[in-house]
Image: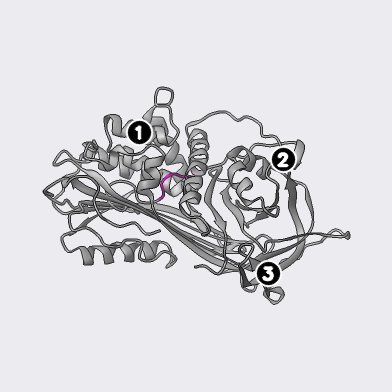
Amino acid sequence: MEGGSKRAGSAHLPACHFANAVGVGAGLGVPGSGAELSAFLHPPNGSLSGRSSSKMASSFYGVLFVVGLCAAICCVPPSNSPRGGCPRPSSTKSTPASQVSSNNANFAFRLYRRLLAESPGQNVIFSPVSISTSLAMLSLGARSATKTQVLESLGFNITVISEASIHRGFQDLLLSLQVSSSDLGLRMGSTLFISQDLQLQAPFLADLRRLYETTVFPMDFSDSVVAQQRINSYVKRETRGKVVDVVHDLDPLTTMVLVNHIFFKGKWEKPFEPENTKEEDFHVDATTTVRVPMMSRLGMYVKFHCSTLASTVLRMDYKGNATALFLLPDEGKLQHLEDTLTTELIAKFLAKSSFRSVRVRFPKLSISGTYDLKPLLGKLGITQVFSDNADLSGITEQEPLKVSQALHKAVLTIDERGTEAAGATFVEYVLYSMPQRVTFDRPFLFVIYSHEIKSPLFVGKVVDPTQH
């Protein structure tokens, strides 16, 4: 769904926009894709006094939150195998980074269920880590109840964990996300576009740069068409062309846009051979069938049936330190899977290590999702920052601000090998036994997980692989 840029509430507060973009690429390893979140800040109700210039790198659209509304993060504990084939996680020592990861994961699934409710019968793809990071950045400039509401909605009990520890945890997470190799590319950044006349609080700018490595750019929002083009061009470049036109109908009264972007490109550890890809049926629902290019491969995989979810779980690893989990519900059990899946179960699945011979058939696909986060975040308890009662005085005391928009766009592409896997050769020895089979020819869920940050990078549902 597309979010407009209309301002909520009266016209006194300058508005802030929040935009987020994510890109993921996979050759069944995700060739390239990206996600972005944007937030827009406007003066609450009236005049917009000025616009300030500065420099910031990352993607934040508008003043509040732009990339992602919260980041999904899962912990990966070791396990044994209780009923339903689901292993049991073990406890780990709590650190700021581990608490951020744990809270991100829980927030991700709360947001995911809201997205499912708002997008019935549609593909869903979002980057929880991008969204949560954007919200954490926003909290740096929030004060009083506005700050408390944002942090508590992210799952933090601020009477137990200090605000400094929260931001230190996000800082560690961001450092872990900067991965670049021939096999795995993973990068997240943030950029702040601010009005040329807006005077920002020095501590806010310093913390954005120090903790979140944010780049700041001055912008003339009075020419909204040119400003929109500049922001969209920046996002397109940072996500390798995967996320385009994330910002629409930019309000000339915008004073600040925060953009957070994440880009992931992975190669399957066990690539598919293109010559084995054949066109086959994919059953969208009981009455709708579409034709899709179906990849096929015989190999050794972690694959099992979880009775708790009434679903088959397949784990496919990327080269590097990332993993994809695909969950195929039993016939008629999609709703049950969506209602039952938890971060604890994801952690158990990631701890499984029993490989078996499996014939995998999986659709090539390229899907995207664009979401207006404002109503979704409101249902998760984040409301004040969008209202005339917002206290963002930590950003500027020049005039009151509120967030007018929070947008998130993510794109996911999955194919046989990945964009840079051409020419690669993979030899695997498969046990000589009757292989099990799993065919993803009906709606399924997925989680793309980073072992570096112990959190999901992307979460979603494929309903129709032909819907782009």
Which of labels 3 and 1 is toward the front? 1
Please say whether residue 332 is one of the residues in the magenta stretch: no
Q: Residue at x 43, y 31 (%)?
A: 156
- As measured in the structure, the alpha-carbon distance from the residue carrying label 3 to the one carrying label 1 is 46 Å
The image's colouring method is one colour
Left/right placement of residue 268 relative to residue 148 reads right
Q: Which mark is residue 10?
A: none
Q: Could you tell me residue 90's position as x and y percent?
A: 66, 31
Q: Compared to 459, does 94 lie above or below?
A: above
The label shown at residue 86 is 2
- Asked whether 71 falls inside the magenta stretch, the response is yes
Q: Which of marks 3 and 2 is nearer the N terminus?
A: 2
Residue shown at the point (50%, 50%) measured from the top left: 116
Which residue in the rendered view is the most extreme toward the right? 433
Residue 188 visible in the picture: yes
Q: How packed is label 3: few (under 14 Cα within 10 Å), some, or many (20 or more)?
A: many
Type of the residue with mark 1: Gln
Q: Could you tell me which residue is drawn at 48 percent across and 62 percent down?
A: 368
Secondary structure of residue under mark 1: helix
| Tag 3: amino acid | Met
Q: Residue 295 carries which label?
A: 3
Q: Which of 405 and 133 is in front in this view?
A: 405
